[in-house]
Image (spheres, coloured by chain):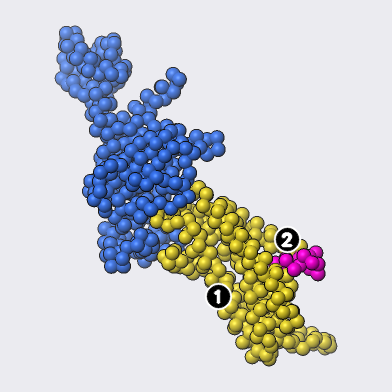
């Protein structure tokens, strides 16, 4: 893996892609810093795979610029930097008729690994991903999970500077998922990982930065912690005496900064209007106490990425409705 | 490039695609000489009591029968086995996977064309040699030069259809489309040959390579007589490969 970890591994500027009249990407921008683990999120059909294919030069951009490892991407022309990139498609595919070991050998040969290095890495990876016993079986006879593990082994085999992983853990069992996430975490600072996933808990666990896109439009590009903090700040958990819950909810709803009050078990979840979380927190607690409510807990609610993700999508839908 | 060539060879061997074509050519190389020699005896045996007069089989008859069978059944099998050479990989996503690695588009196509051409050229050359030796053993000697020119003529014609199916496989989405279109062209060319044969246009028509097989084997036609259809066929192969490469270079995968 390359030690040059300054600058950007991927730069995408005003990327537009039309398929006939369908606008798949509508001016996407983002930068992936070298050495980072970058999450690329969006619902099905958002344009994630299209973006990845443009980055790899497999499909043409209608307009916009893409740079990968400092090399401008030109559709149809072989990129020199592909030697330092390895890509795992959403559904891993391998040429027909090959065994698992042969598929890895093919990848090693394409990337020009020496026989000695490729043999030792292949054996190690096959063992690591529990594919040793199936190494000489045809890949077509593998289960989907095995194919995904083989696909990840094929990506790691060449120790690339940039790993582009499209839904890499979708078919794996919990143990397989944990292994892959551990590997990706260990790659931080040594390689760049561009990672698309539907499993938001995984993204939250390993990604430094994320971009959220929907229907070809970038909604947000932000640090993972920053996103979670932003949405966590807008929600508070309040616990009161059980007999005071209904009255408390009624009082809270009257506050001008409150957007929504819901019940979560014994507690109340209070969501502020955008940007009014601190005002709400400062005023609400004294008001409740003045009204004789016994507050046993008043704390920002921990938000996971899934909640933040849906909050971003919801905000976007509201904006669209207003427009 | 070597890696891609080995991958192609391995895939075709494992999937029994090109070996199937070679087996068919070998089948006719081994079947036609004895069939030609013993056909009259077999018919006489079954038609007991009837006097059937048939001309004595010649070695040229046996060799031409082999060449004709390959030019028909052999080509049909070739179309069937080669129609998915690119389109199937495009369909399954293998093409995109390979091209996301340090492999250029022309390297990808070139590896496939080289393996296809080598299979056709070496396969037919080998089987023609076998057919020639077998024929001379069973029926007596005949012109080696005639057999060589006729084999070359057949190879050029098979290469043309190999190239047509490869081109369609590259530019079309599914193997069935590629195979269906090539088959249509194969039959249309055969029908058109009925009208072209004997006219001036025949000098440039690729099917002339097949209609001249017997005269070439018998030595009544010399190589210069087929130079023009040979050049047209090889020129068409080059043109089709150029068009396929050009289209593939701008194809979204």
Q: Which residue lies furthest to the top in this view?
A: A291
Disc on the earlier residue, 1 or 2: 1
Percent x, y for residue A316?
Answer: 39, 25
Few, some or many C-alpha atoms within 10 Å of disc 1 (few <14, some 14-19, many ≥20)? few
Q: Are marks 1 and 2 in contact (CB under 8 Å)?
A: no
Alpha-carbon span between mark 1 and mark 2: 28 Å
Q: Main secondary structure of the magenta part?
A: helix
Q: Is residue A24 left or right of residue A253?
A: right
Say which mark, if any, is on residue B69.
none
Write down which chain is painted yellow: B
Say which mark, if any, is on residue B188.
2
Write down which chain is painted blue: A
Query: For the point 29% across and 11% down, which residue is it?
Result: A256
Position of B86 relative to A66 (above/below): below
Q: Is residue A82 left or right of residue A270?
A: right
Segment colored magenta = B193-207
Can residue B197 be found in the magenta stretch? Answer: yes
Quadrant of res B233: bottom right
Residue B194 appears in the rendering: no
Element class at badge 1: helix
Can residue A215 be found in the magenta stretch? Answer: no
Quadrant of res A228: top left
């Amino acid at each position: 893996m390359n030690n040059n970890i300054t600058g950007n591994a991927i730069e995408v500027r005003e990327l537009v892609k039309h398929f006939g009249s369908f606008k798949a990407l509508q001016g996407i921008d983002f930068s992936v810093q070298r050495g980072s683990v970058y999450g690329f999120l969006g619902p099905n059909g958002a344009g994630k795979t299209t973006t990845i294919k443009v980055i790899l030069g497999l499909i043409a951009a209608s307009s916009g610029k893409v740079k990968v490892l400092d090399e401008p991407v030109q559709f149809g022309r072989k990129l020199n930097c592909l030697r330092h990139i390895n890509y795992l498609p959403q559904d891993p595919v391998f040429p027909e008729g090959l065994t698992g070991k042969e598929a890895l050998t093919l990848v090693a040969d394409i990337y020009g690994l020496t026989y000695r290095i490729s043999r030792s890495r292949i054996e190690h990876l096959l063992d690591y991903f529990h594919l040793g016993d199936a190494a000489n079986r045809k890949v077509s006879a593998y289960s989907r999970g095995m194919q995904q593990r083989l696909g990840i082994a094929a990506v790691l085999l060449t120790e690339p500077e940039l790993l582009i992983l499209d839904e890499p853990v979708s078919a794996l069992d919990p143990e397989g998922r944990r292994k892959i996430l551990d590997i990706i975490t260990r790659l931080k600072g040594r390689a760049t990982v561009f990672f698309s996933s539907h499993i938001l808990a995984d993204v939250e666990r390993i990604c430094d930065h994320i971009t959220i896109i929907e229907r070809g439009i970038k909604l947000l590009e932000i640090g993972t912690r920053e996103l979670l903090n932003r949405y966590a700040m807008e929600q508070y958990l309040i616990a009161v005496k059980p007999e005071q819950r209904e009255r408390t909810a009624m009082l809270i709803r009257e506050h001008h900064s409150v957007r929504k009050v819901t019940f979560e078990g014994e507690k109340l979840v209070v969501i502020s209007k955008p940007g009014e979380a601190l005002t709400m927190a400062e005023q609400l607690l004294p008001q409740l106490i003045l009204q004789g409510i016994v507050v046993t807990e008043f704390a920002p609610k921990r938000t996971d990425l899934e909640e933040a993700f849906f909050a971003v999508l919801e905000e976007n839908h509201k904006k669209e409705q207003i427009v | 490039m070597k890696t891609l060539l080995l991958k192609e060879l391995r895939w075709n061997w494992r999937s029994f695609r090109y070996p199937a074509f070679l087996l068919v050519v070998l089948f006719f190389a081994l079947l036609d000489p004895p069939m030609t020699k013993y056909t009259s005896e077999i018919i006489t045996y079954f038609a007991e009591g009837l006097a059937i007069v048939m001309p004595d089989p010649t070695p040229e008859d046996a060799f031409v029968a082999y060449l004709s069978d390959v030019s028909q059944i052999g080509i049909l099998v070739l179309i069937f086995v080669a129609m998915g050479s690119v389109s199937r990989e495009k369909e399954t996503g293998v093409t995109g996977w390979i091209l996301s690695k340090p492999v250029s588009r022309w390297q990808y196509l070139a590896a496939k064309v080289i393996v296809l051409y080598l299979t056709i050229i070496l396969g037919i050359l080998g089987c023609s040699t076998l057919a020639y030796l077998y024929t001379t053993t069973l029926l007596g000697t005949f012109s080696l030069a005639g057999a060589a020119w006729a084999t070359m003529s057949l190879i050029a014609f098979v290469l043309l259809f190999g190239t047509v199916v490869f081109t369609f496989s590259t530019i079309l989405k599914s193997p069935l489309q590629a195979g269906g279109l090539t088959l249509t062209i194969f039959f249309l060319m055969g029908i058109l040959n009925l009208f072209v044969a004997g006219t001036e246009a025949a000098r440039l028509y690729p099917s002339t390579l097949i209609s001249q097989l017997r005269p070439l084997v018998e030595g009544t036609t010399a190589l210069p007589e087929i130079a023009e259809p040979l050049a047209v066929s090889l020129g068409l192969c080059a043109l089709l490969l150029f068009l396929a490469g050009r289209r593939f270079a701008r194809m979204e995968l």
